[in-house]
Image: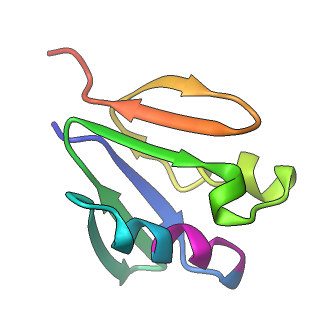
């Protein structure tokens, strides 16, 4: 299944949604039931500084849940890949 993250539909996280719209191969759906769904294959990757997120907002970005396997998540980079079948 393609990696996805579910982003809470609040102003603090909108830069993530807007940035995802500019990424080739990234699909943005929603908002639906208060969440955006961001999907890409085979990798979904974001950099905190490109989004202008403070660390607290950055670390809260995954509170809506995800599909896939986190292969890297630190103070600057988030990478989610397809989960092994």
Compared with 12, 72 (above or below) is above
Is residue 60 in view from this perspective? no
52 is within the stretch colored magenta: no
Residue 50 image point, x, y percent: 64, 59
Question: Which quadrant of the view contains residue 20?
Answer: bottom left
Question: Which quadrant of the view contains residue 39?
Answer: bottom left
Residue 45 image point, x, y percent: 44, 43
Compared with 40, 77 (above or below) is above
Q: On the rendered image, what quadrant is the N terminus found in?
A: top left
Point out the residue furthest to the top here.
84
16 is within the stretch colored magenta: yes
From the viewer's perspective, tell me whether residue 21 is left or right of residue 64: left
Residue 74 image point, x, y percent: 70, 29
Relative depth, front residue between 34 and 40? 40
Is residue 9 in view from this perspective? yes
From the viewer's perspective, tell me whether residue 83 is left or right of residue 16: left
Compared with 34, 72 (above or below) is above
What residue is at 41 percent from the left and 79 percent from the top?
A: 33
From the viewer's perspective, tell me whether residue 3 is left or right of residue 6: left
Residue 73 image point, x, y percent: 62, 29
Q: Main secondary structure of the magenta part?
A: helix
What residue is at 19 percent from the left and 42 percent from the top?
A: 41
Compared with 65, 70 (above or below) is above
Q: On the rendered image, what quadrant is the C terminus found in?
A: top left
What residue is at 33 percent from the left and 32 percent from the top?
A: 68
Q: Which residues are magenta?
A: 12-17
């Amino acid at each position: 299944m393609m990696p996805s993250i579910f982003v809470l539909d609040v102003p603090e996280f909108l830069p993530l949604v807007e940035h995802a719209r500019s990424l080739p191969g990234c699909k943005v759906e929603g908002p639906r039931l208060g969440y955006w769904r961001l999907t890409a294959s085979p990798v979904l990757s974001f950099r905190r500084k490109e989004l202008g997120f403070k660390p607290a907002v950055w670390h809260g970005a995954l509170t809506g849940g995800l599909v896939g396997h986190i292969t890297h998540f630190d103070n600057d980079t988030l990478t989610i890949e397809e989960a092994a079948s």
